Amino acid sequence: MKRRTTSARSSACASVTLVTGGARSGKSRFALQEALACKRRAFIATATASDDEMAARIGKHRAERGNDFLTIEEPVDPARAIAKLPEDTDVAVIDCMAVWVGNLMHRHPDQMSFAEVDRFLSAIRTPPCDLLVVTNEVGMGIVPANELARNYRDILGSLNQEIARISSRTILMVSGIPVVVKGKK
């Protein structure tokens, strides 16, 4: 992440970093640490408190971020959240694409493509600030046994590929270790 010296939004300098990896690989921690290099930080959260365990998990993550990040909760349309970022935002962490795709599939159970995905991909092509996009890598395990899980894997895998194409950096987290797949360390 580059430290910005101006307070005006400038997408000409903004970059997109995709942070991917398995569950509990350190993706979110890495993205938050990277964002701390910038002064004005935002966090776009896609998770919703669908049960007590998830509510506790969200609460823990909020407490860990403290007041270091402006938090915008947007479970369905992160492009809208990007558009709502304050103009002086230096960096935004978007966490996470895997949860977001699950939200979309829950909302539109009979669809395999979503207008929200198209809007998001358009928004990150000319980001208003640096973006750190967190996602789960879904293509390294066994083929799921049921159609819904295979559809989820296919949708998220395709989204991850598109974000990686757009990104200037792609980081694969392996047991807490960042491995640069694309771009500079």
Image (cartoon, rainbow, N blue to C red):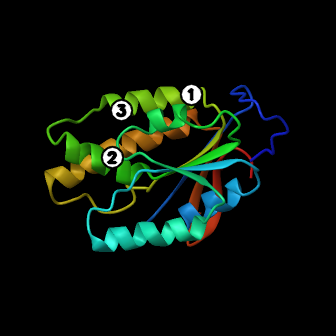
Mark 2–mark 1 Cα distance, whole angstroms, equals 19 Å
Residue at 71% from the left image edge and 30% from the top image edge: 9
Residue lying at the far right of the rendered structure: 5
Question: Which one is earlier in the sequence, the residue at label 2 or at label 1?
Answer: 2
Q: Give amino acid for label 2.
A: Val
User: Number of labelled discs?
Assistant: 3
Determine crowd level at label 1: few under 14, some 14-19, many 20+ residues with C-alpha closer than 10 A: some
Can you give x and y, in whole percent of width and height, for residue 40 in the image?
Answer: 71, 47
Q: Residue 125, which numbered label?
A: 1
> Looking at the image, do the residues carrying marks 2 and 1 touch, with CB atoms under 8 Å apart?
no
Q: Label 3's element? A: helix
Q: Residue 46, which numbered label?
A: none
User: Mark 3 or mark 1: which is in front?
Assistant: 3
Q: Quadrant of residue 110?
A: top left
Q: Which residue is mark 2?
A: 101
Q: Residue 116, which numbered label?
A: 3
Can you give x and y, in whole percent of width and height, for residue 112 in the image?
Answer: 23, 36
Can you give x and y, in whole percent of width and height, for residue 111 in the image?
Answer: 19, 35
Determine crowd level at label 3: few under 14, some 14-19, many 20+ residues with C-alpha closer than 10 A: some
User: 127 or 156: nearer the eye?
Assistant: 127
Q: Give amino acid for label 3.
A: Glu
Residue at 41% from the left image edge and 40% from the top image edge: 159
Q: Is residue 35 above or below residue 126?
A: below
Mark 3–mark 1 Cα distance, whole angstroms, equals 14 Å
Question: Which one is earlier in the sequence, the residue at label 3 or at label 2?
Answer: 2
Q: Is residue 54 above or below residue 164?
A: below
Q: Give amino acid for label 1.
A: Arg
